């Protein structure tokens, strides 16, 4: 597939001003962390897991029953999601309950899902 390109030799730099303050707003660590977040969201099973706990705090056993996967598999997914800051956990007795870290995660997932279902 060929993308039409514009002859840039006819452009002057003034025609394409970029707000450098906006571009410089984020440092290398911010980009690295955002890329990690997208990698974590880039797996269908993890995305489904996040969608489930977006609506209800749940323990590992409950998530495993919902997904039809083993406790070990679900635990590993939650460990990665927690490392990337997408989920938080709360202990109650011997149970660990997981939920989304904040509404930004929910909004990001919903925007992505809505975007791909638009016609």
Image (cartoon, rainbow, N blue to C red):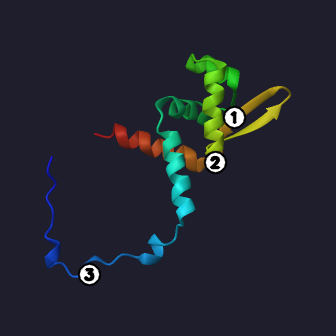
Quadrant holding the C terminus: top left
> In whole angstroms, how far apart are the C-alphas of marks 1 and 3?
50 Å
Q: Is residue 55 above or below residue 17?
A: above
The image position of residue 31, as x and y in percent, is: 51, 59
Asked which secondary structure carries label 3, the reply is helix
Q: Are marks 3 and 2 in contact (CB under 8 Å)?
A: no
Q: Earlier in the sequence, mark 3 or mark 2?
A: 3
The image position of residue 45, as x and y in percent, is: 51, 28
The image position of residue 65, as x and y in percent, is: 62, 17
Q: Is residue 49 left or right of residue 18?
A: right
Q: Which residue is mark 3?
A: 13
Q: Which residue is mark 2?
A: 102
Q: Is residue 94 left or right of residue 64?
A: right
Query: Which of labels 1 and 3 is toward the front?
Result: 3
Please state which of residues 17 and 51 is positioned toward the viewer in this rendering: 17
Q: Residue drawn 15% across and 62% down?
A: 5
Q: Residues within 10 Å of mark 1 (few under 14, many from 20)?
A: many
Q: Residue drawn 60% across and 48% down?
A: 103
Q: Quadrant of residue 52?
A: top right
Q: Is residue 67 above or below residue 15?
A: above
Q: Quadrant of residue 17?
A: bottom left
Q: Residue drawn 24% across and 80% down?
A: 15
Q: Are marks 1 and 3 in contact (CB under 8 Å)?
A: no
Q: Residue drawn 60% across and 31% down?
A: 77
The number of discs equals: 3
Query: Which of labels 3 and 2 is toward the front?
Result: 3
Q: Which residue is mark 1?
A: 98
Q: Is residue 109 left or right of residue 15?
A: right
Q: Residues within 10 Å of mark 3 (few under 14, many from 20)?
A: few
Q: Is residue 46 above or below residue 35?
A: above
């Amino acid at each position: 597939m060929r993308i039409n390109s514009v002859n840039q030799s006819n452009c002057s730099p003034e025609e394409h001003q970029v707000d450098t303050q906006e571009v410089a707003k984020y440092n290398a660590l911010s980009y690295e962390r955002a890329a990690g977040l997208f990698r974590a969201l880039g797996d269908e099973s993890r995305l489904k897991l996040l969608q489930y706990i977006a609506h209800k705090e749940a323990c590992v056993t409950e998530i495993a029953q919902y997904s039809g996967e083993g406790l070990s598999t679900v635990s590993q997914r939650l460990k990665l999601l927690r490392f990337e800051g997408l989920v938080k956990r709360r202990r109650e007795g011997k149970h660990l309950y997981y939920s989304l870290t904040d509404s930004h995660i929910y909004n990001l997932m919903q925007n992505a899902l809505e975007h791909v279902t638009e016609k």
